[in-house]
Structures are given as C-alpha cells and as structure tokens.
Image (tube, rainbow, N blue to C red):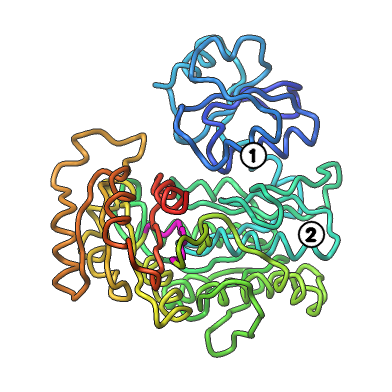
Amino acid sequence: MPPKSIWQYKKAHMVGIKGVGMTALAEILLKNGVVLTGSDVKDEFMTDAVLLGLGVAVADFDARNINGTGAVIRSNAYGPDNSEVKAAHDRGLPLFSYPEVVAELFNAHYGVAVAGSHGKTTTTAMLAHILKFAGKNVTAIVGSKALNWGTSALAGDLSDARAPFVLEADEYKEAFLNYHPHGAIIANIDYDHPDYFKSSQEYENAFAKFIALVPAGGFLVINGDDDVLYKIASHAVCKVIAVSVKTAESFPLQFPGAHYLFDANLAYQAALQLGVDGSVARAALADFKGTARRMELVGQRNGMLVFDDYAHHPTEIRATLAALKGKYPAKKIIAIFQPHTYSRTKALFDDFGNAFSDADRVVFADVYPSARETKEHAAGVDIEKMALIAREGGTDAVCVKNKDDIPDYLKKILADEKNAVVVTLGAGDVWQVARELIR
C-alpha cells in the first residue's frame, strides 16, 4: 500500500536532494516541522549553498543513510537502481516520489500551476514574488533560485488551506498531471523531452490533459499567440485569459528580453485573478531581480560582460541571444553552448546548429548527459557537425568538447577584447565556465 501522507512522518530522508525542486521542497518541509536528511552525487550544484544555509548536510548515496528515518522521498531522477531507493523498498519504508509529496501539499491549498515548454521558471518566480510583495501567505516552488529570496522556494504557513501555492509544473513524464490546480498559466507548447514523448502529438496531448484538470471555477492564463496552445485551450471548462504580443502591457523590468516581458504579462494577469491590485503587481514586477541562470549577469572582467543562461532548447537560445544583441548592439556576442541530454540533442540537432545567428562566435562543448543515459545513447551525436551547421549559417563556430578547457581557450582569443558579451548556455554544468571567466 502506498504511503498516505508525508505529514504522518516527523523525519524524512531525501534521495537526490540537490535537485532544484527537491531543495525547494526541503525548505518548505523544514519550515513546516519535518526533520530532514539528504543525499546526492558529489558534483557541485547551485543548490549546495542553499542546503548549507538550511543546515542540511548532504551525504553520498549509501543504503545506510535511510537508517532511522520515517519516510524516504526520492527525486524523479532516481529509481529502483539507486541503493537508497532499493533499500527503502526492501525494508518496506514509506517511499514517496517528489511529485507525490508536492502534489499532496499543492492540492491541499489554493494551487496555481505554471507550465509550458519555455519561460515557466521566470513566470512562476514573478507570480510568487507579486503575491509575496502583496503580503499574501504564499508558498512557492520554482525551478531556479529567485534572486530576491536567495532560494528556490517561499515557505508559507501550510496550516491555512486557503493560502496560495504557486508551483512550477513540469511536463516531463507528465508529472504535472499529479496536480489539481485552481488556476494555471501555460506559457507555450514547443516539442521537447523526446526521450519520453515520442512525437509532438504526444507532447501536446499531455498539455490537453493538464488543462482538463483546471475546474470550471478556476482560471487559465495562456499565450494567445501560440496557435497550438490556443486551440487546445479552447476546450477548457474554466475562464481563459489569452495574452498576446499586441495586447501585452509594458513593465519596467530589471533585465532585457521580449520573452521576459511576455512572462511578466502572464504573471500579471494571474495575479489580478488572485485579487492583487494592478498597481501593487506593477510595483512588484519592478522590484523583481530575476532568477539564477536566466539571463544572469555573473560579472565583468576587463570590460567584458559575462552572463549565464539555462537555455537548452533552440527556441530558448534564440530568445536569449536576441535579448543580448538588442541590449548590447555594439558588442560582440560570444556564446558557449553545452547541449543537454543526447535524446534532445539528436531530436533537435539541426535546429540547435541554426540557433546562433545573433552570436558573433559560438563555442560548442560536448553533451551533458542525463543520469538516465548511457554511452549507447551517444551514438550518432557529433558536435563537430553542429558547429559546421552554425558556420554554414554565417556564425564563427568552434568545438572545445571538454568544458574545462573553454576558459583557457577564451582567455587567449579575448585577451585584448573589452567590447564583448560572453554568455554560457545550457542546463548542465556550463555555468561553471562563466564563473571561471571572471574568477
């Protein structure tokens, strides 16, 4: 029998606690009375500092880590082949997945789920920040660190069932179908996760099922310029608010990019539905500092600006580079791209190669694979060919497959370059390059 409720257990162990969502969940559970331990790989993650601040020591994976715990919560990245998950199953310990725990908390409150292929992290953080700014008792889980808070979570008082819970709802493996939102935002639908969704139709069907979860008394804010999304949303039983570029309002954001302005409009419309005054929502958006790894200015070195961005899909790469080119038209834009997962790289290979037209130079690193992938998945992926596609499109492109070699390569070619903007792009560990460049 599956465990009934996480609140039955005063102590829990989290497997894969360094994941952004898992770290956010840890903060919420800790602040609502659950004692936690955690484990993960040794690799450095942005969440290490957050967990240190929360007082959670992170151990290496070991079956002995679950001794003395009440329940085990596993990241979706880890299954029965993980030693701790296997031990929990063998011993009959209550074993929850991340979506199961989040769903229990979210579904017991006034949940607003933010979904979409791109932009959901920023939109989630914007909406949560507006509600916090407005003095609401809001709980939130965001897919990156919100710079205003210093963490990826807002831990409200969960004893109030009427309190808003804002959640970044991931479509991967249809995880967002665990949630029953009173309101939702969908930023766009753009085929992704080919390792799970075998076609664009399967991917779109998942969003159709998600929309069906929003009840008649709820609301749905959508990108009205997305034809696929607009068609699917026409079957919603709830109130639908469509935002388009033509009707979008202007907000004084602290960072560039038309895509971020559009995210702000989605969050703003949802905030109005949640009873926030428009002037308060505007002030909150002006106060919003952004999220880590989303057009994040890491620093400067000898006049060179260094940014970092999570963009790992061709659409996201184009949006980020267009924003930088628009902000710094007189500077050379140098992109460093690390593809994320072999499955995505294979499925969108040519699109990746053609995504760098707004860059003056691009450096391609080797693929950062998923923990689920093996050497067999790498067959047929040749990053040199991706660089060739970029060169054929008019962009100066090279391959430096080992990410750790990229800082030295760039320092040589940029030794006297003070008029450059460098941006690292990818969902893996390419962010370390940006920090090394300004170190």
Residue 304 in the image, given as x and y percentages of width and height:
43, 66
Which of the pair 344/362 is nearer the observer? 362
Neighbour class for label 2 at 10 Å: few (<14), some, many (≥20)?
Answer: some
Residue at the image point whose x is 76% and y is 73% from the top: 281
Residue at the image point whose x is 43% and y is 21% from the top: 82
The disc placed on residue 132 is 2
Residue 201 in the image, given as x and y percentages of width and height:
34, 61
Q: Is residue 40 above or below residue 286?
A: above
Residue 420 counted in the magenta span: no
Which of the pair 178/12 is nearer the observer? 12
The amino acid pointed to by label 2 is Lys
Which of disc 1 and disc 2 is earlier in sequence? 1
Neighbour class for label 1 at 10 Å: few (<14), some, many (≥20)?
Answer: many
Q: Is residue 157 above or below residue 231?
A: above
Hey, which residue is sitting farthest front in the picture?
416
Q: Regarding mark 1 in the picture, which secondary structure is present there?
A: helix
Q: Regarding mark 2 in the picture, which secondary structure is present there?
A: helix
Residue at the image point whose x is 68% and y is 55% from the top: 166
Residue 338 in the image, given as x and y percentages of width and height:
32, 52
Residue at the image point whose x is 70% and y is 47% from the top: 107
**How far apart are the alpha carbons under marks 2 and 1?**
20 Å
Looking at the magenta stretch, what is its main secondary structure?
A: strand
Residue 206 in the image, given as x and y percentages of width and height:
45, 56
| Residue that carries the numbered disc 1 in the rendered image | 50
Rendered image quadrant of residue 203: bottom left
Read off the magenta span.
Answer: 304-312
The amino acid pointed to by label 1 is Val
